Amino acid sequence: MQITSSLVPFVSVLWINVFSLAGCKTNPASGRIWAEPQMPGLYMNGDFIIGGIFTIHYYTNSEQNTYTRLPPHLQCSGSIDFRQLRFARGMEFAIREINNRTDLLQDITLGFQIYDSCSDVQMATKAGFQFANGLDSILTESNSCSVSSAAHVTAIVGDSASTPTIAMAGTFGLFGIPQVSHLASCACLSDKRQFPAFFRTVPSDHHQAAALARLVKLFGWTWIGAVRSDTDYGNYGMAAFLKAAQEEGICVEYSEAYFRTQPHNKLERVANIIRRSTARVVVAFLAAGDMRFLLEELARKPLPPLQWIGSEAWITHPEFLRYNMCAGAIGFGIPRSLIPGLREFLLDLSLAQVLKSPLLMEFWESSFSCSLKGKTGVRECDGSEDIRALQNPYTDTSQLRVTNLVYKATFAIAHAIHAVICNNTQCDKTIKFTPWQIYEQLKRVNFTTKNGYQVNFDSKGDPSALYELTNWQFKKDGTLDFVPVGYYDASRPSGQEIGISSMITWVGGQTEVPVSVCSESCPLGTRKAVQKGRPVCCYDCVPCAEGEISNKTDSLDCLCCPPEFWPNARQDVCLPKPVEFLSWDDTLGITLTVFSIAGTFMSVCVTAVFYKHRTSPIVRANNSELSFLLLFSLTLCFLCSLTFIGRPSEWSCMLRHTAFGITFVLCISCVLGKTIVVLMAFRATLPGSNVMRWFGPPQQRLSVLGFTFIQVLICVLWLKISPPFPFQNLKLYKEKIILECHLGSTIGFWAVLGYIAFEAFLCFILAFLARKLPDNFNEAKFITFSMLIFCAVWITFIPAYVSSPGKFTVAVEIFAILASSFGLIICIFAPKCFIIVFRPEQNTKKHLMCKVPSKAL
């Protein structure tokens, strides 16, 4: 059964207190701890002791617990981690540097006790209690059975891993002992309610998770895999990353966890998932030890090219540079730094110093393959070993990263102690203080280290988040190396946190960003349609509906174009709709214009003929004055059709309908007057009839004026109440705008047409009644024909007008005007002109009065 990390501190405290109190009960004055204390790996006495705990080993020996005897003592096992040893000695270097300074803790000597947690919670907790109580195996009332007012150590630097640090921080919080970690980055440690005395010099994984999510988003990867350590570091970090990735619209194909002590089949399963996945980018939130096992397993079988995105725990670990499968990997690491004098300190290691420390002895034996204890079969170390000839992570100070965090943590504690026991002139080592006083001063520290780094903590005990974007690139000699290519600075404005400073080399040596998507980007003119049962990053690209566009890739929805716009063929831009109207340069407009001018020219020609022969009988007959007025009105009718051509405007819309209505009424009024004259003339030939004096020229003029005035009145009312106006018809066609004249008041329009129809119908009836009058040249017969054509044209006009679309509506109206006008001028005036021009012998009064036999025309 696994115990969750939040219960570990409680269980550990309970375990140790049970044995401690049991000892106290046997003797009220003293008791013996049942477990032997663990000796520090590195130590030095001083006026004030600073504790240090590092993950120098990664394993412990384990035996089955029988519960019939005391649990066996845990011992570290496995090979020593040279980097972690360098971290520990970096703390020793910082303390020695502090002791040599005159401006910090003057006349005060700091000591240290450094332990190896072996990446184990129990070992870390045991070391933690030793920090609090000391190394005495005998517990007295003053140091165990009651809580001491002062801890054995002033403060602690460490641990390296998050899980043991969580266990320690929960315990130290109870005693108020400040703890400053250099590498425990779990975001959970920022909770001051659980870990009130915890500080760190490494940024919280909250920032790293956000940085990784934005990095993935920056390069357009929406389909990724994720693998993490099955620890507090990996689980909390990956949870924060997945949350940030979801907010950035990134989908995760798989999210797997692994811890190095789990069965090998679990590791195989994780490796096979990575091999079979379609995601070409893998985000690895793994501790260095777990990443080592995973890479070794992946190297057993062929692996598709993968773009690795690493967390700070392994992305700058030099051990992994031997895995070429990770070439091109990128990730955020701790910024590199320089610590003057550190390399000389690390190399200034004599055999005598080594023999004083079990950790240094193990390092020496492992580095030089010799034995300091006289083991059989192994060469004995004789002191001739040259540490300066070594090339391993312990001696490599070219890219100090975590070591600098240890350096800053140690100096932060020293500044806090200085603030408690020192004034402006001197320090007093006899001052009694509690760990809480150091804690309060740690919250306020703000200084710059000797190598130029600012050190301070926010309200959560965290430093400002600054990462170095690291890329694994091949050097000229074919080996991999860490190359800084950018940064992440959480203090910068939103959206500007990531900066790329140089070219990145991707997996396979590519210079182009690799692609890792579940579905290809939807091009312009399409939208995403999520595939059923799959993540949102897996979708189909569906073309936008009619009238809609998408003007960016991967659009979730298409946008409707404004009413006056329409999509282009690719449906990625809304273009202004073409405006359609019967224009002058349109073929149909040109044709109708030609017929209109031809009709006008015909009217002018007929007028000229009639004027030239105005004294002839055929012109004088049936009131030549009405004939000239009719010709004038027909000319206006032909010309008014031109007002319907061209772009509609406010004035043209009002003019075209009113001019058409008035000129046609004037025209029909003249025809009606001529018809009445014919009927009256027939009645006047009857004996005793005196009717012509009641409808002479004055009355004829007055009738035409009266009939026309009524139409003028209708038009005035129409223009006054609701006149026609230019109108953009957006509904008739989806892809274009019809610019037309809105009628305004439809009642006014149909009133104008209705009055014309009434006059035309009245004229037709009267002409029909006079069609058989006994004249050789019966004008009523021709008026009947003209009115028949006129009525036929306008009767067919109504359905054609209503059903014609766009500019053809105007064309139908112009055609009706021209057709009826040509019908009138041809039926009424063509026979007369034919006689005047071609049959002048028939242009006599006798012939018109039927006194001369007529010849067939």
Image (spheres, rainbow, N blue to C red):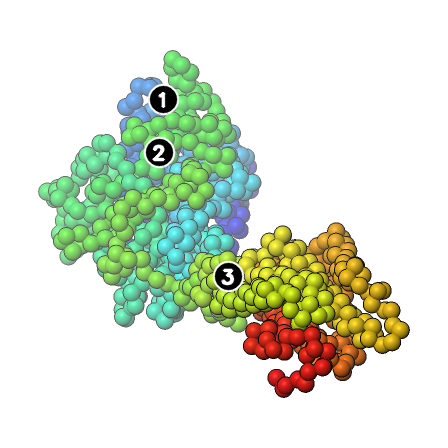
Q: Is the residue marked by circle 1 packed among few (<14), some (14-19), or many (20+) residues within 10 Å? A: many
Q: Where on the picture, by quarter, is residue 827?
A: bottom right
Q: Is residue 791 left or right of 590 when viewed as pictured?
A: right
Q: Secondary structure at mark 3?
A: loop
Residue name at image x 51 percent, y 32 percent: 148
Q: How would you rate the neighbour count of disc 2 (Cα within 10 Å): few for under 14, some for 14-19, many for 20 or more?
A: many
What residue type is disc 3 on?
Trp
The answer to which of marks 2 and 1 sits earlier in the sequence is 1
Front-most of residues 144 and 113: 113
Q: Which residue is mark 1?
A: 105
State if disc 3 and disc 2 touch (CB < 8 Å). no
Q: Residue at x 66, y 63 (%)?
A: 628
Question: Residue 166, relative to residue 737: is it above or below?
Answer: above
Whole-number angstrom distance, CA of label 2 to CA of label 3 = 85 Å
Residue found at the very far left of the displayed protein: 384
Q: Residue 102: x, y in percent?
A: 31, 19
Mark 3: give few (<14), some (14-19) or many (20+) Cα within 10 Å.
some
Q: Which mark is residue 584?
A: 3
Q: Which residue is mark 2?
A: 408
Which of the image's four quarters has the C terminus? bottom right
- Camera-near label (2 vs 1) is 2
> Which kind of residue does numbered mark 1 sit on?
Leu
- Residue 359 vs residue 231: left or right? left
Which residue is at the front of the view, 356 or 565?
565
Where 587 falls versus 380 (above or below)? below
Q: Position of residue 428 (x, y in %)?
A: 41, 17
Compare residues 727 and 577 and report the one nearer the observer: 727
Q: Earlier in the sequence, mark 1 or mark 3?
A: 1
